[in-house]
Image (cartoon, helix red, strand yellow):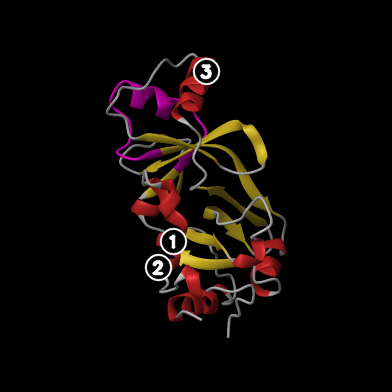
Amino acid sequence: MALKHISLLRQSTQPGQSLTGLLLVASPALADTPFARSVIYLCAHAHDGGAMGFVVNHRLPKVALDEVLDQLEIGQLPPHSRVGICAGGPVEETRGFVLHSTDWKTEGSLVVCDDIALSASLDVLKESMAGRGPRDALLAMGHASWGAGQLEEEIFRHDAWLLAPASREIVFGADYAAKWRQALASIDLDPVRLTGQTGHA
């Protein structure tokens, strides 16, 4: 197994260590599920409080973004806008959340790490429409969540997820189809060599 993945796993087993800010990369164990080849950015994780994150590589068409903005009475984003839209997960699929760079934030924004924040306010979209928004932004419709201990069980007992470091290219990049392979490459894994038995030893 890739050394980077092993290192991240060892860190996650430290008392109180959080996986917040890391990527969950779907292993072949999830091949026949809705999470097949998903890449999830974890915005919150606590061993005794569960976890929450957003799928960042299931793109929704631009027409979907236009429809959402119309419904919210925001108008259309300018052509140069860097706001993407994706299906963030199976929970609250009609609710939008915005992952964005920390060069723009409000009091209601949750700073996940040094360069990524999360906002549920429409202000970030309105500012982006006016050309004053963050450098990078991704509108996620819905999210993924786990109860206390559930994510750890999926990682350690069922080999469902691999851990990888997050990067601007993977979280905000426009090439959604490439993100799963990019995330695997970041931990030195070749998807061709992956099997249904993704051990952690």
Question: Can residue 176 be spotted in the picture?
Answer: yes
Tell me residue 190's x, y (percent). Answer: 44, 72
Name which of mark 3 and mark 2 comes first in the sequence.
3
28 displayed left or right of 157: left
Which amino acid type is marked by label 3?
Leu
Which residue is nearer to you in this view: 60 or 52? Answer: 60
Q: CA distance from mark 3 to mark 2?
A: 38 Å
Q: Residues within 10 Å of mark 3 (few under 14, many from 20)?
A: few
What mark, if any, has residue 181 been given in the picture? 1
Tell me the magenta residue range.
Answer: 118-137
Secondary structure under badge 1? helix
Name which of mark 1 and mark 3 comes first in the sequence.
3
Mark 3 or mark 2: which is in front?
2
Q: CA distance from mark 1 to mark 3?
A: 34 Å
Residue linked to disc 3: 72
Residue linked to disc 2: 185
What mark, if any, has residue 107 been given in the picture? none
Q: Residue visible at 36% across and 22% down?
A: 77
Q: Residue visible at 61% across and 80% down?
A: 199
Tell me residue 165's x, y (percent). Answer: 42, 64
Q: CA distance from mark 2 to mark 1?
A: 6 Å
Tell me residue 159's x, y (percent). Answer: 65, 71
Q: Does residue 135 belong to the magenta stretch?
A: yes
Give the position of the C terminus as an image quadrant: bottom right
Q: Is residue 108 above or below residue 125?
A: below
Q: Quadrant of residue 178?
A: bottom left
Disc 2 and disc 1 in contact, CB within 8 angstroms: yes
Which residue is nearer to you in this view: 83 or 102? Answer: 83
Q: Is residue 17 above or below residue 181?
A: below
Which amino acid type is marked by label 1?
Arg
Secondary structure under badge 2? helix
